[in-house]
Image: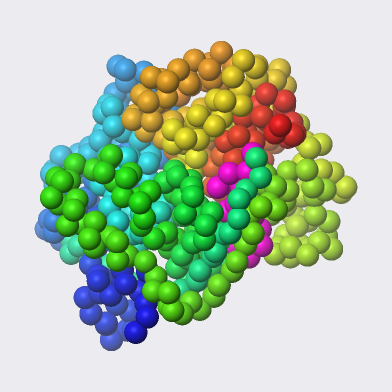
């Protein structure tokens, strides 16, 4: 029977169907961080259990860590007591149970969805979970990767299995060549604007088409990262030569193991006659740079468009449009280009990889951050990204322009650390969500690409990229 990529991964890891109709599947890799793991480890201790397979688990602190640290920084230097407790507990639990951790002092510490692939722990064909919704990022490698809750984190630690219902299949085909200045972030925001944040509910989305075939692994990770914002639990891209070359560069597999693995990875694609429950075809050649205007990723328009009025044919209902405009301080008839920005954030598990930083650095080289911008920060996704950027002189380009160069962490993406917006500040952000208060109480977030964020920092407003 013809199978989709998701079906193949599911069948390879399926253990049994339960009486409830749910299934038990085997999990190859679990990533852990300081926010959703403490209760899971506490559960293991109370039940006198140990992790089923130690080597399957990798940990790092990312959500709560300050991004102004320096070389001599330790856990004890964290000012916020709750953040300190969570990071300390991760240290204690990893030491107690023997789990590999890249702690706050490690040169490889970083956002969990950035360090996993770059350190070679994410491999094609794996099932991957983490107590974080953007685990879908790893689907760019042809993995069945999904976010889970704290109780499920404990279950995976104890049994290396997960109880879950099978998803429906959805395919999004991106065809064509994008315009200059249009990135994968723009492409996926455009998709979310078209289908809404519920468009992928109950589905695993497989991304395909000649656009996908021709982009980098970094760009693919951005698209799969944002699949969750389209309502999907899983985002997938079939492994190909680009995937294999990335894995060869980053993994520690022997040549023999790589050869054996590659023979299997080459089979991880949807059969030509596989049936999808939903299918969408999008021509990317007509897409302009995208910027969100409201309080949901689906509230997105072309960067130069007039903002939607209450009669607009968009996914959000009229009440939500009105509430979003009030929260965002937007008046009828305004354009995005009319809005003045206070802060700029380049980072997050969506856009903090070396390719993202290179793109932004090119845009600001030899220029200065606008005097109207209170603060512009760049937060590399990992110690490896930071070191690579510094070796290329990108840190100097950013600092010469007036950006603040930070240490790795989730940073302003979710504001569980000192990097937060003040009330009513307007931020150009490369992160993945723009919910009310996401980056700080009453903060106003506009999602965009690293290139658009860089230009906004220089101009103080959204403008032409050329």
Q: Image quarter for residue 250? A: top left
Q: Residue visible at 32% across and 72% down? A: 8
Question: Is 270 left, or right, of 211 in this rendering?
Answer: left
Return the x and y of residue 234 as percentages of the image width and height. Answer: 43, 63
Return the x and y of residue 162 as percentages of the image width and height. Answer: 27, 67
In the rendered image, residue 422 lying in the magenta stretch gets the answer: no
> For the magenta stretch, what is the residue range?
181-197
In the rendered image, residue 185 lying in the magenta stretch gets the answer: yes
- Residue furthest right as drawn: 333
**Residue 298 seen in this snapshot:** no
Return the x and y of residue 301 as percentages of the image width and height. Answer: 72, 51
Give the vertical position of 364 relative to 89 (above or below).
above
Q: Image quarter for residue 49? A: bottom left
| Quadrant for the N terminus in the image | bottom left
Q: Nearer the viewer, residue 202 or 245?
A: 245
Colour theme? rainbow
**Residue 349 seen in this snapshot:** yes
Give the vertical position of 40 relative to 100 (above or below).
below
Badge count: 0
Q: Residue visible at 44% across and 36% down? A: 353
Return the x and y of residue 6 as percentages of the image width and height. Answer: 37, 69
Magenta region's main secondary structure? helix
Q: Residue visible at 44% across and 49% down? A: 221
| Quadrant for the C terminus in the image | top right
Q: Residue visible at 21% across and 75% down? A: 15
Q: Nearer the viewer, residue 176 or 458?
A: 176
């Amino acid at each position: 029977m013809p199978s989709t990529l998701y079906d193949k991964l599911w069948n390879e890891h399926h253990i049994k169907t339960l009486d409830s109709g749910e299934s038990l599947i085997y999990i190859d890799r679990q990533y852990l961080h300081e926010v959703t793991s403490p209760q899971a480890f506490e559960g293991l201790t109370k039940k006198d259990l140990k992790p089923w397979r130690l080597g399957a688990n990798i940990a790092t602190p990312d959500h709560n860590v300050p991004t102004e640290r320096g070389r001599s920084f330790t856990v004890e230097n964290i000012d916020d007591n709750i953040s300190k407790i969570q990071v300390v507990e991760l240290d204690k639990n990893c030491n107690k149970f023997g789990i590999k951790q890249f702690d706050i002092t490690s040169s490889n510490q970083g956002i969990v969805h950035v360090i996993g692939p770059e350190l070679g722990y994410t491999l094609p064909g794996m099932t991957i979970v983490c107590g974080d919704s953007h685990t879908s990022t790893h689907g760019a490698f042809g993995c069945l990767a999904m976010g889970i809750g704290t109780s499920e984190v404990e279950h995976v630690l104890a049994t290396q299995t997960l109880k879950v219902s099978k998803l429906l299949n959805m395919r999004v085909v991106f065809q064509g060549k994008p315009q200059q200045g249009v990135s994968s972030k723009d492409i996926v925001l455009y998709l979310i604007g078209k289908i809404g944040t519920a468009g992928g509910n109950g589905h695993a989305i497989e991304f395909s088409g000649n656009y996908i075939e021709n982009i980098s692994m970094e760009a693919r990770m951005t698209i799969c990262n944002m699949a969750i914002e389209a309502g999907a639990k899983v985002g997938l891209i079939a492994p190909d030569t680009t995937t294999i070359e990335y894995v060869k560069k980053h993994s520690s597999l022997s040549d023999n193991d790589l050869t054996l693995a590659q023979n299997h990875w080459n089979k991880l694609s949807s059969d030509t006659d596989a049936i999808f429950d939903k299918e969408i075809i999008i021509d990317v050649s007509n897409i302009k740079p995208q910027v969100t205007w409201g309080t949901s990723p689906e509230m997105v328009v072309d960067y130069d468009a007039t903002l939607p009025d209450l009669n607009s044919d968009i996914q959000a209902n009229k009440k939500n449009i009105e509430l979003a405009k009030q929260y965002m301080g937007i008046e009828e008839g305004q354009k995005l280009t009319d809005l003045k920005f206070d802060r700029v954030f380049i980072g997050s598990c969506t856009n903090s990889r070396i390719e993202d930083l290179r793109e932004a650095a090119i845009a600001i080289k030899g220029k200065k951050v606008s005097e109207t911008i209170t603060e512009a920060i760049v937060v590399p996704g990992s110690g490896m990204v930071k070191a690579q950027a510094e070796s290329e002189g990108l840190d100097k380009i950013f600092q010469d322009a007036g950006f603040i160069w930070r240490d790795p962490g989730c940073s302003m993406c979710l504001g569980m650390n000192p990097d937060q917006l003040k009330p009513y500040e307007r931020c150009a952000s490369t992160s993945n969500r723009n919910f009310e208060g996401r980056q700080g109480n009453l903060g106003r977030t506009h999602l965009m690409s690293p290139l658009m964020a860089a230009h906004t920092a220089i101009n103080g407003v959204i403008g032409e990229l050329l």
